[in-house]
Protein backbone atom coordinates (compact mmCIF):
# COMPACT_ATOMS: atom_id res chain seq x y z
CA UNK A 1 0.00 0.00 0.00
CA UNK A 2 1.20 3.45 -0.85
CA UNK A 3 2.13 5.76 1.94
CA UNK A 4 -0.44 8.36 2.76
CA UNK A 5 0.66 11.94 2.27
CA UNK A 6 -1.03 14.66 4.28
CA UNK A 7 -0.58 18.27 3.24
CA UNK A 8 -1.45 21.26 5.40
CA UNK A 9 -2.21 24.02 2.92
CA UNK A 10 -2.44 27.77 3.48
CA UNK A 11 -3.94 30.33 1.11
CA UNK A 12 -4.07 34.11 1.62
CA UNK A 13 -3.59 35.59 -1.85
CA UNK A 14 -6.66 37.82 -1.82
CA UNK A 15 -9.53 38.24 0.62
CA UNK A 16 -10.03 34.71 1.93
CA UNK A 17 -7.93 33.42 4.81
CA UNK A 18 -7.92 29.69 4.22
CA UNK A 19 -6.32 26.47 5.42
CA UNK A 20 -6.97 22.86 4.55
CA UNK A 21 -5.72 19.33 5.12
CA UNK A 22 -5.62 17.21 1.99
CA UNK A 23 -4.78 13.50 1.73
CA UNK A 24 -2.93 12.19 -1.33
CA UNK A 25 -3.88 15.19 -3.42
CA UNK A 26 -7.48 14.16 -3.92
CA UNK A 27 -9.17 13.73 -0.56
CA UNK A 28 -10.10 16.87 1.36
CA UNK A 29 -10.11 16.21 5.11
CA UNK A 30 -10.88 19.81 5.96
CA UNK A 31 -11.33 23.06 4.08
CA UNK A 32 -11.55 26.11 6.33
CA UNK A 33 -12.26 29.51 4.80
CA UNK A 34 -12.58 32.77 6.65
CA UNK A 35 -14.15 35.09 4.11
CA UNK A 36 -13.67 38.81 4.49
CA UNK A 37 -16.16 39.69 1.81
CA UNK A 38 -18.45 41.72 4.09
CA UNK A 39 -15.55 43.95 5.06
CA UNK A 40 -14.71 44.78 1.46
CA UNK A 41 -18.28 45.21 0.23
CA UNK A 42 -18.23 48.67 1.80
CA UNK A 43 -15.42 49.65 -0.56
CA UNK A 44 -16.75 47.96 -3.70
CA UNK A 45 -13.78 45.68 -4.01
CA UNK A 46 -10.91 44.16 -2.11
CA UNK A 47 -8.79 46.70 -0.22
CA UNK A 48 -5.32 45.15 0.00
CA UNK A 49 -4.32 46.70 3.35
CA UNK A 50 -7.58 45.69 5.01
CA UNK A 51 -7.26 42.17 3.57
CA UNK A 52 -3.72 41.83 4.91
CA UNK A 53 -4.73 43.04 8.37
CA UNK A 54 -7.53 40.53 8.53
CA UNK A 55 -5.26 37.71 7.36
CA UNK A 56 -2.78 38.24 10.18
CA UNK A 57 -5.60 38.47 12.69
CA UNK A 58 -7.31 35.22 11.65
CA UNK A 59 -4.63 32.96 10.22
CA UNK A 60 -3.80 30.92 13.33
CA UNK A 61 -7.43 30.24 14.18
CA UNK A 62 -8.11 29.18 10.58
CA UNK A 63 -5.15 26.78 10.57
CA UNK A 64 -6.06 25.31 13.96
CA UNK A 65 -9.69 24.83 12.92
CA UNK A 66 -8.53 23.09 9.79
CA UNK A 67 -6.27 20.67 11.66
CA UNK A 68 -9.00 19.99 14.21
CA UNK A 69 -11.70 19.34 11.62
CA UNK A 70 -9.37 16.97 9.79
CA UNK A 71 -8.83 15.14 13.07
CA UNK A 72 -5.04 15.46 12.83
CA UNK A 73 -2.24 17.31 14.55
CA UNK A 74 0.73 19.04 13.00
CA UNK A 75 2.78 15.90 13.76
CA UNK A 76 0.70 13.92 11.26
CA UNK A 77 1.37 16.39 8.45
CA UNK A 78 3.98 15.50 5.79
CA UNK A 79 4.44 18.91 4.19
CA UNK A 80 3.26 22.50 4.34
CA UNK A 81 1.84 23.89 1.08
CA UNK A 82 1.33 27.61 0.58
CA UNK A 83 0.24 29.96 -2.19
CA UNK A 84 3.15 32.27 -3.01
CA UNK A 85 1.66 33.99 -6.05
CA UNK A 86 0.07 35.49 -7.97
CA UNK A 87 -2.04 37.77 -5.79
CA UNK A 88 -1.89 40.80 -3.53
CA UNK A 89 1.66 40.97 -2.24
CA UNK A 90 0.81 42.07 1.30
CA UNK A 91 -1.83 39.39 1.59
CA UNK A 92 0.41 36.66 0.15
CA UNK A 93 3.22 37.57 2.55
CA UNK A 94 1.12 36.70 5.60
CA UNK A 95 0.50 33.15 4.40
CA UNK A 96 4.06 32.70 3.15
CA UNK A 97 5.69 33.92 6.39
CA UNK A 98 3.31 31.83 8.49
CA UNK A 99 3.86 28.70 6.39
CA UNK A 100 7.63 29.09 6.47
CA UNK A 101 7.64 29.52 10.25
CA UNK A 102 5.46 26.43 10.71
CA UNK A 103 7.66 24.43 8.34
CA UNK A 104 10.78 25.55 10.19
CA UNK A 105 9.44 24.96 13.68
CA UNK A 106 7.96 21.56 12.86
CA UNK A 107 10.78 20.41 10.58
CA UNK A 108 8.38 19.72 7.68
CA UNK A 109 9.16 20.39 4.03
CA UNK A 110 7.75 23.56 2.47
CA UNK A 111 6.06 23.54 -0.94
CA UNK A 112 5.15 26.82 -2.62
CA UNK A 113 2.15 26.66 -4.93
CA UNK A 114 0.97 28.80 -7.83
CA UNK A 115 -2.54 30.04 -7.08
CA UNK A 116 -3.86 29.20 -10.56
CA UNK A 117 -2.36 25.71 -10.45
CA UNK A 118 -4.36 25.38 -7.26
CA UNK A 119 -7.57 26.42 -8.99
CA UNK A 120 -6.93 23.87 -11.72
CA UNK A 121 -6.10 21.14 -9.20
CA UNK A 122 -9.43 21.77 -7.43
CA UNK A 123 -10.90 19.58 -10.18
CA UNK A 124 -9.06 16.51 -8.84
CA UNK A 125 -11.05 16.49 -5.60
CA UNK A 126 -14.40 15.53 -7.08
CA UNK A 127 -13.23 13.95 -10.34
CA UNK A 128 -11.01 11.05 -9.33
CA UNK A 129 -10.80 9.98 -12.99
CA UNK A 130 -9.48 13.31 -14.27
CA UNK A 131 -5.82 13.14 -15.24
CA UNK A 132 -3.71 15.30 -17.56
CA UNK A 133 -3.58 16.02 -20.42
CA UNK A 134 -6.65 18.21 -20.68
CA UNK A 135 -7.65 21.76 -21.53
CA UNK A 136 -8.64 24.06 -18.67
CA UNK A 137 -10.46 27.38 -18.75
CA UNK A 138 -9.39 29.38 -15.70
CA UNK A 139 -11.78 32.25 -15.00
CA UNK A 140 -11.77 34.39 -11.89
CA UNK A 141 -11.71 37.99 -10.72
CA UNK A 142 -8.05 38.28 -11.59
CA UNK A 143 -7.53 35.71 -14.36
CA UNK A 144 -8.91 34.55 -17.67
CA UNK A 145 -6.67 31.87 -19.15
CA UNK A 146 -6.98 28.91 -21.44
CA UNK A 147 -4.41 26.45 -20.16
CA UNK A 148 -3.03 23.24 -21.62
CA UNK A 149 -2.47 20.98 -18.64
CA UNK A 150 0.16 18.67 -20.07
CA UNK A 151 1.00 16.90 -16.81
CA UNK A 152 0.57 17.49 -13.08
CA UNK A 153 3.50 19.87 -13.17
CA UNK A 154 3.41 21.26 -16.68
CA UNK A 155 1.08 24.05 -17.68
CA UNK A 156 0.99 26.09 -20.84
CA UNK A 157 -1.16 29.17 -21.35
CA UNK A 158 -2.54 29.30 -24.88
CA UNK A 159 -5.16 31.99 -24.39
CA UNK A 160 -5.38 35.00 -22.11
CA UNK A 161 -7.29 38.22 -21.66
CA UNK A 162 -5.93 41.37 -23.23
CA UNK A 163 -7.61 43.64 -20.68
CA UNK A 164 -10.13 42.85 -17.94
CA UNK A 165 -10.47 39.42 -16.41
CA UNK A 166 -13.91 37.89 -16.80
CA UNK A 167 -14.72 38.26 -13.11
CA UNK A 168 -13.52 41.85 -13.17
CA UNK A 169 -15.96 42.60 -16.00
CA UNK A 170 -18.75 41.09 -13.90
CA UNK A 171 -17.81 43.32 -10.95
CA UNK A 172 -17.63 46.49 -13.03
CA UNK A 173 -20.90 45.90 -14.83
CA UNK A 174 -22.66 44.89 -11.60
CA UNK A 175 -21.54 48.15 -10.06
CA UNK A 176 -22.72 50.14 -13.06
CA UNK A 177 -26.21 48.62 -12.98
CA UNK A 178 -26.49 49.10 -9.23
CA UNK A 179 -26.22 45.48 -8.15
CA UNK A 180 -23.19 46.04 -5.93
CA UNK A 181 -20.30 43.81 -4.96
CA UNK A 182 -19.42 40.99 -5.51
CA UNK A 183 -20.63 41.26 -9.09
CA UNK A 184 -20.38 37.68 -10.32
CA UNK A 185 -22.95 35.99 -8.06
CA UNK A 186 -25.27 39.02 -8.21
CA UNK A 187 -25.31 39.20 -12.01
CA UNK A 188 -25.74 35.43 -12.18
CA UNK A 189 -28.75 35.58 -9.86
CA UNK A 190 -30.70 38.45 -11.48
CA UNK A 191 -29.89 37.16 -14.98
CA UNK A 192 -32.16 34.19 -14.33
CA UNK A 193 -35.15 36.55 -14.60
CA UNK A 194 -33.71 38.59 -17.50
CA UNK A 195 -33.87 38.24 -21.27
CA UNK A 196 -30.40 37.44 -22.59
CA UNK A 197 -31.20 38.19 -26.24
CA UNK A 198 -32.80 41.59 -25.81
CA UNK A 199 -29.58 43.59 -26.05
CA UNK A 200 -26.87 42.68 -28.54
CA UNK A 201 -23.56 43.27 -26.76
CA UNK A 202 -20.31 42.56 -28.67
CA UNK A 203 -18.23 39.36 -28.49
CA UNK A 204 -14.63 40.37 -29.15
CA UNK A 205 -12.37 38.46 -31.50
CA UNK A 206 -8.73 39.31 -31.47
CA UNK A 207 -6.92 39.29 -34.79
CA UNK A 208 -4.23 36.62 -34.86
CA UNK A 209 -4.95 35.37 -31.33
CA UNK A 210 -7.88 33.00 -31.74
CA UNK A 211 -7.89 31.85 -28.11
CA UNK A 212 -7.44 35.25 -26.46
CA UNK A 213 -10.15 37.23 -24.71
CA UNK A 214 -11.11 40.86 -24.36
CA UNK A 215 -13.86 42.18 -22.12
CA UNK A 216 -13.22 45.91 -22.03
CA UNK A 217 -15.15 46.52 -25.26
CA UNK A 218 -18.09 44.61 -23.85
CA UNK A 219 -17.90 46.57 -20.61
CA UNK A 220 -17.82 49.87 -22.55
CA UNK A 221 -20.79 48.77 -24.65
CA UNK A 222 -22.79 48.14 -21.48
CA UNK A 223 -21.75 51.50 -20.00
CA UNK A 224 -22.56 53.31 -23.26
CA UNK A 225 -25.95 51.69 -23.33
CA UNK A 226 -26.61 52.78 -19.74
CA UNK A 227 -25.56 56.35 -20.58
CA UNK A 228 -27.77 56.45 -23.65
CA UNK A 229 -30.72 55.46 -21.47
CA UNK A 230 -29.94 58.29 -19.08
CA UNK A 231 -29.62 60.75 -21.99
CA UNK A 232 -33.08 59.86 -23.13
CA UNK A 233 -34.16 61.22 -19.76
CA UNK A 234 -36.19 58.14 -19.28
CA UNK A 235 -34.62 57.25 -16.02
CA UNK A 236 -37.80 57.62 -14.08
CA UNK A 237 -40.04 55.17 -12.36
CA UNK A 238 -37.94 53.17 -9.97
CA UNK A 239 -34.77 55.12 -10.55
CA UNK A 240 -35.84 58.10 -8.53
CA UNK A 241 -33.57 60.89 -7.42
CA UNK A 242 -32.95 59.31 -4.06
CA UNK A 243 -31.51 56.31 -5.79
CA UNK A 244 -29.39 58.47 -8.00
CA UNK A 245 -28.02 60.32 -5.05
CA UNK A 246 -27.24 57.02 -3.44
CA UNK A 247 -25.37 55.88 -6.51
CA UNK A 248 -23.20 58.97 -6.47
CA UNK A 249 -22.36 58.61 -2.81
CA UNK A 250 -22.02 54.91 -2.60
CA UNK A 251 -21.64 53.31 -5.96
CA UNK A 252 -20.64 50.13 -4.23
CA UNK A 253 -23.77 49.25 -2.39
CA UNK A 254 -26.69 47.37 -3.83
CA UNK A 255 -29.24 49.98 -4.84
CA UNK A 256 -31.27 48.22 -7.53
CA UNK A 257 -33.00 44.91 -7.94
CA UNK A 258 -33.51 42.97 -11.15
CA UNK A 259 -36.99 44.39 -11.72
CA UNK A 260 -35.87 48.01 -11.76
CA UNK A 261 -36.21 49.56 -15.18
CA UNK A 262 -33.16 50.82 -17.03
CA UNK A 263 -35.08 51.89 -20.13
CA UNK A 264 -38.78 52.28 -19.28
CA UNK A 265 -39.60 53.20 -22.89
CA UNK A 266 -38.49 49.81 -24.13
CA UNK A 267 -39.28 48.02 -20.90
CA UNK A 268 -35.67 46.95 -20.40
CA UNK A 269 -34.86 45.96 -16.82
CA UNK A 270 -31.65 45.62 -14.81
CA UNK A 271 -32.09 41.85 -15.15
CA UNK A 272 -32.25 42.16 -18.95
CA UNK A 273 -28.99 44.11 -19.07
CA UNK A 274 -27.33 41.63 -16.70
CA UNK A 275 -28.53 38.63 -18.70
CA UNK A 276 -27.47 40.11 -22.04
CA UNK A 277 -24.04 41.02 -20.68
CA UNK A 278 -23.58 37.60 -19.10
CA UNK A 279 -24.57 35.88 -22.33
CA UNK A 280 -21.87 37.82 -24.18
CA UNK A 281 -19.21 36.76 -21.64
CA UNK A 282 -20.33 33.14 -21.68
CA UNK A 283 -20.40 33.04 -25.49
CA UNK A 284 -16.83 34.33 -25.69
CA UNK A 285 -15.56 31.88 -23.06
CA UNK A 286 -17.34 28.86 -24.52
CA UNK A 287 -16.62 29.52 -28.20
CA UNK A 288 -12.88 30.05 -27.66
CA UNK A 289 -12.55 27.04 -25.40
CA UNK A 290 -14.35 24.87 -27.95
CA UNK A 291 -12.25 26.25 -30.81
CA UNK A 292 -9.03 25.48 -28.95
CA UNK A 293 -10.20 21.98 -28.04
CA UNK A 294 -11.08 21.26 -31.62
CA UNK A 295 -7.87 22.72 -33.10
CA UNK A 296 -5.58 21.03 -30.58
CA UNK A 297 -7.43 17.73 -30.30
CA UNK A 298 -8.56 17.83 -26.67
CA UNK A 299 -11.62 15.87 -25.60
CA UNK A 300 -11.34 16.60 -21.88
CA UNK A 301 -12.30 20.13 -20.83
CA UNK A 302 -12.08 21.49 -17.28
CA UNK A 303 -13.04 24.80 -15.75
CA UNK A 304 -11.60 26.47 -12.66
CA UNK A 305 -11.74 29.71 -10.70
CA UNK A 306 -14.55 31.74 -9.15
CA UNK A 307 -16.38 32.43 -12.42
CA UNK A 308 -16.50 28.66 -13.09
CA UNK A 309 -19.36 28.52 -10.63
CA UNK A 310 -21.43 30.88 -12.80
CA UNK A 311 -24.56 28.94 -13.72
CA UNK A 312 -24.86 30.30 -17.26
CA UNK A 313 -21.22 29.45 -17.99
CA UNK A 314 -21.68 25.93 -16.65
CA UNK A 315 -24.84 25.44 -18.70
CA UNK A 316 -23.31 26.94 -21.85
CA UNK A 317 -20.11 24.92 -21.60
CA UNK A 318 -22.04 21.75 -20.79
CA UNK A 319 -24.23 22.14 -23.87
CA UNK A 320 -21.28 22.80 -26.14
CA UNK A 321 -19.29 19.88 -24.75
CA UNK A 322 -22.23 17.51 -25.11
CA UNK A 323 -22.68 18.59 -28.70
CA UNK A 324 -19.01 18.01 -29.45
CA UNK A 325 -18.81 14.78 -27.46
CA UNK A 326 -16.26 16.13 -24.94
CA UNK A 327 -16.16 15.38 -21.22
CA UNK A 328 -16.52 18.44 -19.00
CA UNK A 329 -15.21 18.81 -15.46
CA UNK A 330 -15.66 21.59 -12.95
CA UNK A 331 -15.45 21.77 -9.16
CA UNK A 332 -18.35 22.51 -6.81
CA UNK A 333 -18.76 26.21 -6.03
CA UNK A 334 -16.98 25.92 -2.66
CA UNK A 335 -13.86 24.65 -4.47
CA UNK A 336 -14.15 27.26 -7.25
CA UNK A 337 -13.81 30.18 -4.89
CA UNK A 338 -10.40 30.84 -3.32
CA UNK A 339 -9.72 28.03 -0.87
CA UNK A 340 -6.80 26.10 0.55
CA UNK A 341 -7.99 22.58 -0.35
CA UNK A 342 -7.07 23.28 -3.96
CA UNK A 343 -3.64 24.47 -2.81
CA UNK A 344 -3.28 21.21 -0.91
CA UNK A 345 -4.09 19.23 -4.08
CA UNK A 346 -1.56 21.13 -6.16
CA UNK A 347 1.02 20.98 -3.35
CA UNK A 348 0.67 17.19 -3.22
CA UNK A 349 1.61 16.79 -6.88
CA UNK A 350 4.49 19.23 -6.43
CA UNK A 351 5.56 17.38 -3.30
CA UNK A 352 5.68 13.94 -4.92
CA UNK A 353 7.50 15.51 -7.89
CA UNK A 354 10.17 16.63 -5.41
CA UNK A 355 9.49 20.35 -5.23
CA UNK A 356 10.83 21.88 -2.01
CA UNK A 357 11.14 25.56 -1.19
CA UNK A 358 13.66 27.16 1.14
CA UNK A 359 13.13 29.50 4.07
CA UNK A 360 13.86 32.38 1.71
CA UNK A 361 10.65 31.75 -0.27
CA UNK A 362 9.13 35.12 -1.11
CA UNK A 363 5.67 36.16 -2.20
CA UNK A 364 5.61 36.79 -5.97
CA UNK A 365 2.59 38.94 -6.81
CA UNK A 366 2.90 38.44 -10.58
CA UNK A 367 4.11 34.84 -10.57
CA UNK A 368 3.72 33.29 -14.02
CA UNK A 369 2.01 29.98 -14.54
CA UNK A 370 4.49 27.16 -15.00
CA UNK A 371 7.34 29.21 -13.49
CA UNK A 372 9.53 27.47 -10.93
CA UNK B 1 15.07 28.59 32.42
CA UNK B 2 13.94 30.62 29.48
CA UNK B 3 14.92 31.05 25.86
CA UNK B 4 13.32 34.02 24.16
CA UNK B 5 13.54 34.46 20.40
CA UNK B 6 13.04 38.08 19.42
CA UNK B 7 12.01 39.28 15.98
CA UNK B 8 12.23 42.84 14.73
CA UNK B 9 11.11 43.63 11.16
CA UNK B 10 9.15 46.84 11.62
CA UNK B 11 11.52 49.05 9.66
CA UNK B 12 14.62 49.01 7.51
CA UNK B 13 16.49 46.48 9.61
CA UNK B 14 15.71 42.82 9.89
CA UNK B 15 16.91 41.71 13.29
CA UNK B 16 16.79 38.51 15.31
CA UNK B 17 18.04 37.87 18.84
CA UNK B 18 17.95 35.17 21.47
CA UNK B 19 17.88 35.91 25.19
CA UNK B 20 18.72 32.90 27.35
CA UNK B 21 18.16 33.34 31.08
CA UNK B 22 18.86 37.03 31.00
CA UNK B 23 21.91 36.61 28.81
CA UNK B 24 21.92 38.00 25.28
CA UNK B 25 23.05 34.80 23.53
CA UNK B 26 22.85 36.11 19.97
CA UNK B 27 21.85 39.08 17.89
CA UNK B 28 21.83 39.22 14.10
CA UNK B 29 20.89 42.45 12.36
CA UNK B 30 20.83 43.14 8.66
CA UNK B 31 20.20 46.54 7.17
CA UNK B 32 20.17 45.89 3.45
CA UNK B 33 17.85 46.19 0.48
CA UNK B 34 16.65 42.60 0.43
CA UNK B 35 13.13 42.10 1.69
CA UNK B 36 12.46 40.89 5.21
CA UNK B 37 10.32 38.17 3.71
CA UNK B 38 13.40 36.56 2.21
CA UNK B 39 15.88 37.25 5.01
CA UNK B 40 14.03 36.83 8.28
CA UNK B 41 13.51 33.09 8.56
CA UNK B 42 16.98 32.18 7.21
CA UNK B 43 18.38 34.56 9.87
CA UNK B 44 16.38 32.84 12.61
CA UNK B 45 17.59 29.49 11.32
CA UNK B 46 21.24 30.60 11.43
CA UNK B 47 21.01 32.12 14.88
CA UNK B 48 19.40 28.99 16.27
CA UNK B 49 22.01 26.79 14.61
CA UNK B 50 24.83 28.94 16.00
CA UNK B 51 23.39 28.50 19.48
CA UNK B 52 22.70 24.80 18.92
CA UNK B 53 19.12 25.45 19.94
CA UNK B 54 16.20 23.42 18.66
CA UNK B 55 12.98 25.35 17.93
CA UNK B 56 11.29 23.24 20.62
CA UNK B 57 13.63 24.68 23.25
CA UNK B 58 12.19 28.17 22.84
CA UNK B 59 9.86 29.33 25.60
CA UNK B 60 8.47 32.45 24.04
CA UNK B 61 8.60 34.53 20.85
CA UNK B 62 9.09 38.25 21.40
CA UNK B 63 7.88 40.41 18.57
CA UNK B 64 8.36 44.06 17.79
CA UNK B 65 4.64 44.62 17.37
CA UNK B 66 4.52 48.09 15.90
CA UNK B 67 4.17 50.80 14.90
CA UNK B 68 6.14 50.57 11.68
CA UNK B 69 5.94 49.47 8.08
CA UNK B 70 2.60 47.65 7.80
CA UNK B 71 4.03 44.93 5.59
CA UNK B 72 7.23 44.63 7.61
CA UNK B 73 5.25 44.23 10.82
CA UNK B 74 3.10 41.52 9.31
CA UNK B 75 6.08 39.54 8.04
CA UNK B 76 7.43 39.50 11.61
CA UNK B 77 4.03 38.83 13.14
CA UNK B 78 3.17 35.99 10.77
CA UNK B 79 6.58 34.45 11.45
CA UNK B 80 6.04 34.76 15.19
CA UNK B 81 2.50 33.41 14.96
CA UNK B 82 3.62 30.45 12.84
CA UNK B 83 6.35 29.63 15.37
CA UNK B 84 3.91 30.08 18.23
CA UNK B 85 1.37 27.81 16.58
CA UNK B 86 3.81 25.04 15.71
CA UNK B 87 5.63 25.16 19.05
CA UNK B 88 2.59 25.97 21.19
CA UNK B 89 4.45 28.88 22.75
CA UNK B 90 3.19 32.38 23.59
CA UNK B 91 4.10 35.71 22.04
CA UNK B 92 5.47 38.66 24.00
CA UNK B 93 4.33 41.82 22.23
CA UNK B 94 6.89 44.60 22.56
CA UNK B 95 6.19 48.10 21.32
CA UNK B 96 8.63 48.97 18.55
CA UNK B 97 9.01 52.44 20.08
CA UNK B 98 9.79 51.02 23.51
CA UNK B 99 12.29 48.73 21.85
CA UNK B 100 13.97 51.72 20.22
CA UNK B 101 13.99 53.61 23.52
CA UNK B 102 15.54 50.60 25.23
CA UNK B 103 18.52 50.93 22.88
CA UNK B 104 19.34 53.95 25.07
CA UNK B 105 18.64 52.34 28.45
CA UNK B 106 20.81 53.72 31.21
CA UNK B 107 20.69 57.35 30.19
CA UNK B 108 19.55 58.94 33.43
CA UNK B 109 17.92 62.30 33.88
CA UNK B 110 16.88 62.75 30.30
CA UNK B 111 14.03 61.87 27.99
CA UNK B 112 14.41 59.26 25.27
CA UNK B 113 12.34 60.04 22.21
CA UNK B 114 12.31 57.54 19.34
CA UNK B 115 10.98 58.98 16.10
CA UNK B 116 10.04 56.75 13.17
CA UNK B 117 9.18 58.12 9.76
CA UNK B 118 5.44 57.53 9.34
CA UNK B 119 5.23 59.42 6.00
CA UNK B 120 2.44 61.90 5.40
CA UNK B 121 4.45 64.48 7.43
CA UNK B 122 4.09 62.46 10.61
CA UNK B 123 6.25 60.42 12.93
CA UNK B 124 5.47 57.47 15.11
CA UNK B 125 6.80 58.51 18.46
CA UNK B 126 6.61 58.32 22.23
CA UNK B 127 8.74 59.55 25.14
CA UNK B 128 10.37 57.44 27.83
CA UNK B 129 12.80 57.75 30.73
CA UNK B 130 14.98 55.33 32.64
CA UNK B 131 14.90 55.48 36.43
CA UNK B 132 17.64 53.73 38.36
CA UNK B 133 16.45 51.15 40.84
CA UNK B 134 19.80 49.81 42.00
CA UNK B 135 23.45 49.39 41.13
CA UNK B 136 24.72 46.00 40.13
CA UNK B 137 22.87 43.93 42.72
CA UNK B 138 20.28 42.98 40.14
CA UNK B 139 22.87 41.37 37.88
CA UNK B 140 22.82 38.16 39.86
CA UNK B 141 21.62 34.67 39.14
CA UNK B 142 18.70 34.70 36.82
CA UNK B 143 18.04 30.97 36.69
CA UNK B 144 15.50 31.01 39.46
CA UNK B 145 14.75 34.68 39.75
CA UNK B 146 11.95 36.54 38.12
CA UNK B 147 14.27 39.44 37.41
CA UNK B 148 14.53 40.73 33.88
CA UNK B 149 17.86 41.17 32.15
CA UNK B 150 18.84 44.71 33.02
CA UNK B 151 16.91 45.56 36.10
CA UNK B 152 19.11 48.38 37.33
CA UNK B 153 16.71 50.63 35.47
CA UNK B 154 12.99 50.89 35.25
CA UNK B 155 11.53 52.23 32.04
CA UNK B 156 8.77 54.80 32.39
CA UNK B 157 6.47 56.08 29.67
CA UNK B 158 6.19 59.88 29.66
CA UNK B 159 4.27 60.33 26.41
CA UNK B 160 2.31 57.36 25.05
CA UNK B 161 2.95 56.21 21.51
CA UNK B 162 1.19 58.04 18.69
CA UNK B 163 1.37 59.15 15.06
CA UNK B 164 1.71 62.96 14.99
CA UNK B 165 3.50 65.73 13.09
CA UNK B 166 7.00 66.08 14.56
CA UNK B 167 6.44 69.71 15.57
CA UNK B 168 3.51 68.66 17.73
CA UNK B 169 5.73 66.15 19.51
CA UNK B 170 8.48 68.75 19.96
CA UNK B 171 6.08 71.04 21.85
CA UNK B 172 5.01 68.13 24.06
CA UNK B 173 8.65 67.37 24.79
CA UNK B 174 9.34 71.01 25.65
CA UNK B 175 6.70 70.80 28.37
CA UNK B 176 8.74 68.02 30.02
CA UNK B 177 11.65 70.45 30.35
CA UNK B 178 14.42 67.83 30.19
CA UNK B 179 17.23 67.06 27.81
CA UNK B 180 16.12 64.76 25.00
CA UNK B 181 17.95 62.00 23.12
CA UNK B 182 16.36 61.15 19.77
CA UNK B 183 16.78 57.94 17.84
CA UNK B 184 14.88 56.14 15.08
CA UNK B 185 14.89 56.24 11.30
CA UNK B 186 13.29 59.70 11.22
CA UNK B 187 16.38 61.31 12.77
CA UNK B 188 18.18 61.78 9.43
CA UNK B 189 14.92 62.99 7.88
CA UNK B 190 14.04 65.58 10.54
CA UNK B 191 17.33 66.58 12.21
CA UNK B 192 17.32 70.01 10.57
CA UNK B 193 13.77 70.70 11.70
CA UNK B 194 14.68 69.67 15.25
CA UNK B 195 17.69 72.00 15.13
CA UNK B 196 15.47 74.82 13.97
CA UNK B 197 12.41 74.32 16.16
CA UNK B 198 13.44 72.58 19.38
CA UNK B 199 14.28 74.90 22.28
CA UNK B 200 15.68 72.38 24.79
CA UNK B 201 19.02 70.63 24.93
CA UNK B 202 19.08 67.48 22.80
CA UNK B 203 21.29 64.95 21.08
CA UNK B 204 20.98 62.12 18.58
CA UNK B 205 21.79 58.49 19.26
CA UNK B 206 24.90 57.09 17.58
CA UNK B 207 24.49 54.92 14.48
CA UNK B 208 24.77 51.69 16.48
CA UNK B 209 21.76 52.63 18.62
CA UNK B 210 19.80 54.57 16.04
CA UNK B 211 17.65 51.86 14.48
CA UNK B 212 15.54 48.93 15.68
CA UNK B 213 17.45 46.04 17.24
CA UNK B 214 16.08 42.69 18.25
CA UNK B 215 18.29 42.63 21.37
CA UNK B 216 16.13 45.36 22.87
CA UNK B 217 12.96 43.52 21.89
CA UNK B 218 14.40 40.40 23.51
CA UNK B 219 15.20 42.20 26.77
CA UNK B 220 11.75 43.77 27.03
CA UNK B 221 10.07 40.60 25.79
CA UNK B 222 11.78 38.56 28.48
CA UNK B 223 10.32 40.84 31.12
CA UNK B 224 6.84 40.41 29.64
CA UNK B 225 7.28 36.64 29.53
CA UNK B 226 8.58 36.39 33.11
CA UNK B 227 5.68 38.54 34.30
CA UNK B 228 3.29 36.05 32.70
CA UNK B 229 2.02 38.69 30.29
CA UNK B 230 2.87 36.94 27.02
CA UNK B 231 -0.16 36.31 24.80
CA UNK B 232 -1.53 33.31 23.00
CA UNK B 233 -0.01 33.42 19.48
CA UNK B 234 -3.48 33.16 17.94
CA UNK B 235 -4.63 36.54 19.19
CA UNK B 236 -1.51 38.51 18.38
CA UNK B 237 -1.87 41.17 15.72
CA UNK B 238 0.38 44.19 15.02
CA UNK B 239 -0.28 47.64 16.45
CA UNK B 240 -0.42 49.94 13.43
CA UNK B 241 -1.39 53.19 15.20
CA UNK B 242 -3.03 54.12 11.95
CA UNK B 243 -6.02 53.04 9.91
CA UNK B 244 -5.66 51.96 6.30
CA UNK B 245 -5.94 54.66 3.67
CA UNK B 246 -9.25 53.25 2.42
CA UNK B 247 -10.77 53.38 5.90
CA UNK B 248 -9.60 56.97 6.40
CA UNK B 249 -10.99 58.05 3.04
CA UNK B 250 -14.30 56.38 3.74
CA UNK B 251 -14.57 58.14 7.11
CA UNK B 252 -13.57 61.50 5.64
CA UNK B 253 -16.08 61.08 2.81
CA UNK B 254 -18.86 60.41 5.24
CA UNK B 255 -18.29 63.27 7.62
Image (spheres, coloured by chain):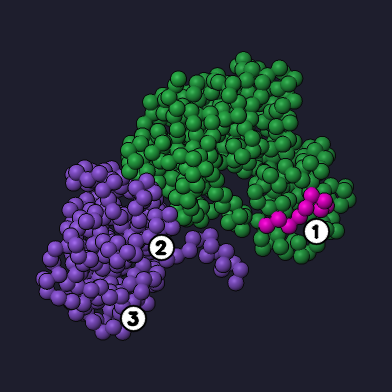
Chain identity of mark 3: B
Q: CA distance from mark 1 to mark 2?
A: 44 Å
Residue at horizontal 45 percent and vertical 34 percent from the top? A7
Residue A263 image position (x, y, % from top left): 83, 50
Residue at horizontal 37 percent and vertical 77 percent from the top? B168
Q: Secondary structure at mark 3?
A: helix
Q: Do marks 3 and 2 both belong to one polypeptide chain? A: yes
For residue B53, side relative to residue A29 (left or right): left
Rendered image: mark on residue A239? 1
Between A335 and A179, the one lying in front of the other is A335
Q: Is residue A257 magenta?
A: yes
User: Is residue B117 visible from the viewing direction of this image?
Assistant: no
| Chain that the image shows in purple | B
Q: Do marks 1 and 2 both belong to one polypeptide chain? A: no
| Chain that the image shows in green | A
Q: Name the quadrant containing residue B254.
A: bottom right
Residue at horizontal 31 percent and vertical 57 percent from the top? B62
Rendered image: mark on residue A118? none
Residue B238 image position (x, y, % from top left): 40, 59
Amino acid sequence: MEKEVLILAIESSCDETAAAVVKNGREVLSNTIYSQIDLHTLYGGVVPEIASRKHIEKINQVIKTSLKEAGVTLDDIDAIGVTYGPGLVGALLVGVAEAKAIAYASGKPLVGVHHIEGHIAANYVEHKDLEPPYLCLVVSGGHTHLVKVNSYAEYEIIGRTHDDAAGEAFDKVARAIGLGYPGGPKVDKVSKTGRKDILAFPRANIEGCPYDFSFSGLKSAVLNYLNSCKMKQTVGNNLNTDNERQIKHSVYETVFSGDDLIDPEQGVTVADVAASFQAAVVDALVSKTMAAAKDLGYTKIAMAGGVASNSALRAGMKEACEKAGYSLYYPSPILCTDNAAMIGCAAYYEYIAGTRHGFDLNAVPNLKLGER
Amino acid sequence: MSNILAIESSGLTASVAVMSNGRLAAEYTVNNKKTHSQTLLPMINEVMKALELEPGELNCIAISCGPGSFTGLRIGSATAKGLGLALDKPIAEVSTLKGLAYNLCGNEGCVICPIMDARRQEVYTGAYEFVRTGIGENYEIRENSKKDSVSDFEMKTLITERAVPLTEMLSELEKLGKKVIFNGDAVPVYKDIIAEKFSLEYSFAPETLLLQRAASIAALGEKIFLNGEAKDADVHTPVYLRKSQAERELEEGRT
